[in-house]
Amino acid sequence: MANLKEVKQRITSVISTQQITKAMKMVSAAKLRRAQDKIIQMRPYSQKLTAILNNVSAASEGATDLVYAQKREVKKVLLIPITSDKGLCGAFNSNVLKATNLAIREQFVGADITVMPIGKKSLEYFKKTSYPRIEDYSTLFLNLSSDAIREAANYAMDAFVAGEFDQVVLVFNEFKNVATQFVRTEQFLPMAAVATEKVTVETDYILEPSREFIIEELVPKALRVQFLKAILESNASEHGARMTAMDKATENAGDLLKELKLMYNRTRQAAITNEILEIVSGANALAGK
């Protein structure tokens, strides 16, 4: 059995850890609220923009040959795994990395893989692999701004148009609620046509200067919004995952404290009993003289 000093040191250590996890939970909760508001506001905008684009494109009767929708034989693939800069968020990062490796093994067998990691955890992982990397945007979350996200999206779009890659795929966590995030492997380029369950009446848009010009302007904007949405989804999911992980860690620290305090009391009682026995034995020995 451990002595009193060792048990007391462990209790002090667990209490300190519990205070840290509580503080991290509170910080994540505050950040989650802001991140959740952003993604909730972004979703309707993204859906409406996509709906407008589909209505306009459907009426164009294929007059416009979109460079972002060109399908080519998949020989070169750009994978964009989006993780966090920090750990202590449960399986948040490992799930994205597992999904990325699964896509490489099953979907892109024989293709040349290039990785554009976003987030320090993603960069650290793929530095240990042999895949070519584009590291310019790995620190995107250090200063999360629309300009930085637009720059990363533009790089992927320009590289696809230039023929450097035949397909661009995003891997990220989609936010559902505080306790639930889903890993998504989403094709970014070429653009996939949005399937509709039933034929809808075309909205009568008045387009100036021309329908083709509007489509060419809307498509890059829609792609940037899609990229921004993936980043915001991942950001909200990170804070939700960390909040949940820290809440669980705080509970576990509380359970461990109960066990350690029980052990401390038992050890203390045993020590007191031994001292009493020693005193009684000494008294008896003196009386026997």
Image: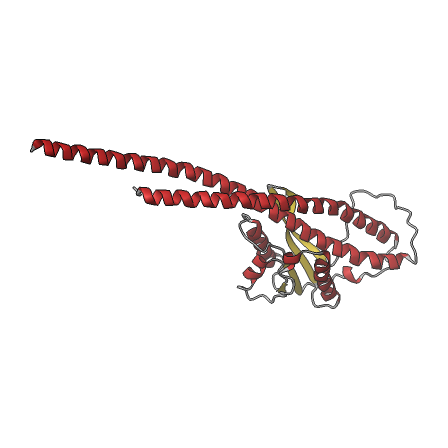
Kindly tell me whether residue 50 is visible in this rendering.
yes
Q: What's the residue at 11%, 34% (across, down)?
A: 285
Q: What's the residue at 66%, 65% (across, down)?
A: 76
- Residue 35 location (% of width, % of height): 67, 47
- Residue 117 location (% of width, % of height): 62, 60
Q: Is residue 276 left or right of residue 131?
A: left
Q: Nearer the viewer, residue 37 or 130?
A: 37
- Residue 70 location (% of width, % of height): 77, 61
Total marks drawn?
A: 0
- Residue 94 location (% of width, % of height): 55, 52
Q: Nearer the viewer, residue 226 or 284?
A: 284
- Compared with 202, 287 (above or below) is above
- Compared with 145, 249 (above or below) is above
Please say which color scheme the image uses.
secondary structure
Quadrant housing the C terminus: top left
Q: What's the residue at 89%, 56% (across, down)?
A: 211
Quadrant housing the N terminus: top left
Kindly tell me whether residue 195 is visible in this rendering.
no
The quadrant holding residue 60 is: bottom right
